[in-house]
Amino acid sequence: MYNFVCCLLSNLVLLAVVRLVCWFIRAMRPDLTPHGTRVFVGMMALACVFDAALTFLVFADAGGPWTIYHPVNAFFARAVAYMLAVTVALILVRRAARRGTREPGKHGTLTIETSPYSKSTLPM
């Protein structure tokens, strides 16, 4: 359980760092639009593949003190932590997308002109 919690916390910290770096990149260079969640999901997929390779190809056959850690059980705990972090990232993106569509004045909203003299508009 301790390994699961540590892996999950490190993955969530990595999610925050990746999203922050992508936000800084977008702020400095508006022509670049990296999507932090997609980068994070790709990193987690790559980490899970490398973790599986190390667990099943290297540590599964290692003898001696490694036999007490049960590599298969440890891998599945880490894999669940990877998937849970990816799920949290996707939920955050979905909530941000919903909140973004509810804000008035966004592009694509319908506005009507209320007065041709004052150039005032009313969002619908």
Image (cartoon, rainbow, N blue to C red):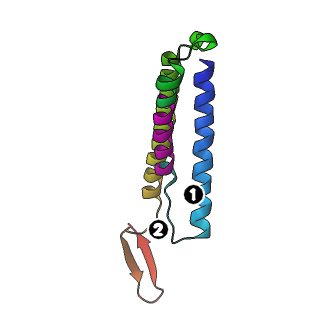
The residue that disc 1 covers is 22
Residue at (41% x, 87% y) in the render: 116
Relative image position of residue 122 (x, y in whole percent): 42, 72
Specify few, some or many for label 1: CA neighbours under 10 Å numbering under 14, 14-19, or 20 or more.
Answer: some
Q: Secondary structure at mark 2?
A: loop
Which region of the structure is painted magenta? 38-52
Up-down relation of residue 26 to residue 64 (above or below): below
Q: CA distance from mark 2 to mark 1?
A: 25 Å
26 or 78: nearer the eye?
A: 78
- Of the two numbered discs 2 and 1 in the rendering, the one whose residue sits closer to the viewer: 1
Q: Secondary structure at mark 1?
A: helix
Q: Position of residue 119 (x, y in %)?
A: 46, 85
Q: 108 or 4: nearer the eye?
A: 4
Instruction: Name the residue at the bottom extreme.
Output: 117
Secondary structure mostly seen in the magenta stretch: helix
Image quadrant where one finds the C terminus = bottom left
**Disc 2 or 1, which lies upstream in sequence?**
1
Residue at horizontal 43 percent and vertical 47 percent from the top: 94
Looking at the rendered structure, the kind of residue marked 2 is Gly
Residue 105 disc label: 2
Whether residues under marks 2 and 1 lie with C-beta atoms below 8 angstroms apart, the answer is no
